[in-house]
Amino acid sequence: MIPRTVETIGSGSAARAEVAIVGAGPVGMTLANLLGVYGVRTVLLERNATTVAEPRAVAIDAESLRTMQAAGLYEEVAADTLLGFHVDYVNGRGRTLLSIDLGPTPYGHAQQNSFDQPIFERALRLGLERFPHVDVRFGHAVEGFSQDASGVSVRGTSSDGRPFSIEAEYLIACDGGRSAMRQQLGIGMSGATAPEKWLVIDTIDAHLAGAFDCRFFCDPRRPAMSIRKRGTKRRWEWMLMPGESEEDLLDDGMIARLLAPHTRPEQVKLERKCVYTFHSLVADRYREGRVLLAGDAAHMMPPFAGQGMNGGIRDARDLAWKLALVVVGAADQALLDSYEVERRSHVKAATALANRLGDLIQPTSRVRAALRDAVFAVLGVVRGGQQVIERSLMRSLRAPRMRRGVFVPSEGGRDEASRLAGQMIFQPQVRTSGGETVPLDDVLGPGFAVVGYDADPAKTLDVGTLAYWRGLGARLVHVLPRGAKATDGTIIDETGHLAEWFGKACSIVAVRPDRFCAAELEPRAAVEATAAFESLLRGVVTASARRAA
């Protein structure tokens, strides 16, 4: 991002930060790590004494792993993650309705991966120790806050009974679905809570270690699912049926009976058991003045698409670079309004996907289940039927794209698929001039980038355009096609994936820190596109910027 000298916050009972975060779960700690990378003075407050000890979230997707790259934590996270898996949906007779490979994507990682949350959170916490300008305070319960035009004052009590106060320019509430921050702001949530409850258990089971990856049991007698994690760990979920109580399913004998068709219960070690109710809820607004909501404080969704925590990590990625620009004065605080614009539409799409998958899994009516099975049976024999189902279910996750937000819409009459602005750039492995093969993001760096495909941005763009993007800390990246000879300062598109992404649309693009294309920078239109993007950062709506807003 923009180079700067950063002061430490200090460890006293009163401190001043640029950003205060309440809640040190995966979302809050991801945001703190990204702000650490960007050089933002940050304080992270968490009422609990340490990170969680029990498994909760279980799936981390390609975009979230790309965010771990940006935070400099990919290797640590990947070491304890099952990278990529296969998911199938079977009916009550054991017939496969649908089978999907959630393996490699063009974005550098598998579509879905499974992990153990306590290990993941420890990696995030250790990552924060790299940054002297990020103050992490566990055992600090926030009791309230106030805000005015100049900042936010946060007050609370530490675990030793001492009061503390924090002065910050912005406060980010990552304090979960029951967010006290959201309640103090008087922000409601819209949506629905599912009437069904589910038993959730986490196990260690060597007997099933190499069995199926992820399976949804679409059995009207009792819908269920299971997903394996790295090593011998596994997650199981079963729906509570009419007439059953939570105590009924939490009984160890009942859990053994539920496990018996799949494994030998006597050799299973139980790590955790609880009963969940699933929600489809979105906050009525994500921002109130200098306070913004992220993660479960802003939205909750059913687990069937594995997007709950991942949606929160997307929040953190979207917010981090915008906050970093605002606090140094490179963007107006009106830029923060775009956070909700960009995130709400994806949250709605991911929630709709989770609900569609839930409809596939959850029918307890034998008639509805039979109709579902019949539809899948017909599509299974129709040529391309499987692909039609998969595309309709997974479209919102397979091609990250923004419809509205901080990007300059592509000009001309090209079809939407060929327009690069608002799309996430692919991330292949590329070869450097030194012969090293690395992921593209390692070359792009943590901030903005201007990427030219078979075009050198430094020699192609005008002086003013280059000065603006360099002023934002952008790296200039010259990509050569596969088969070309690398020269100093160039990289080779060995896989051809970047050629596929660029297509015939354009040869130079500006890429945001979150890897979405900010603007196409063809020389004839680069000055206007750059001015339009600058207007978006400054909160000024020009004719070009209006098309993005």
Image (spheres, rainbow, N blue to C red):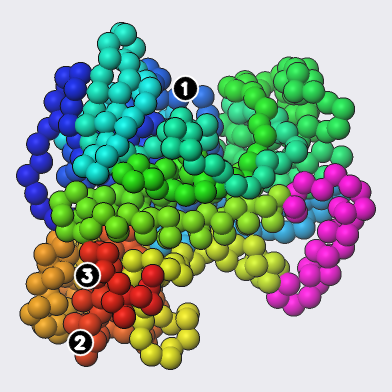
Using the rendered view, name the quadrant where residue 332 is placed. bottom left
Let me know if residue 198 is in the magenta part: no
Horizontal and vertical percent position of residue 380: 78, 68
Q: Which residue is mark 3?
A: 534
How far is the residue under mark 2 from the one under mark 3? 17 Å
| Magenta segment main secondary structure | helix
Q: Is residue 113 visible?
A: no
18 or 310: nearer the eye? 18
- Residue drawn at point x = 75 percent, y = 49 percent: 361
- Decide which of tag 3 and tag 1 comes sooner along the chain: 1
Q: Is residue 453 above or below residue 100?
A: below
In this view, the residue farthest toward the top is 160
Mark 2, Cα crowd under 10 Å, few <14 / some 14-19 / many 20+, is some
**Which residues fall within the magenta stretch?**
359-385
Kindly identify which numbered label has been placed on residue 490: none
Tag 1: amino acid = Ala
181 or 129: nearer the eye? 181
Tag 3: amino acid = Glu
- Residue drawn at point x = 75 percent, y = 54 percent: 360
How far is the residue under mark 3 from the one under mark 1? 45 Å
Q: Is residue 493 above or below residue 23?
A: below
Query: SS for tag 3?
Result: helix
Tag 2: amino acid = Pro
Mark 3, Cα crowd under 10 Å, few <14 / some 14-19 / many 20+, is many
Horizontal and vertical percent position of residue 245: 79, 23
- Residue drawn at point x = 38 percent, y = 90 percent: 412
Kindly identify which numbered label has been placed on residue 53: 1
Left or right: where 111 falls relative to 35: right
Q: How many marks overall? A: 3
Q: Which residue is mark 2?
A: 523
- Decide which of tag 2 and tag 1 comes sooner along the chain: 1
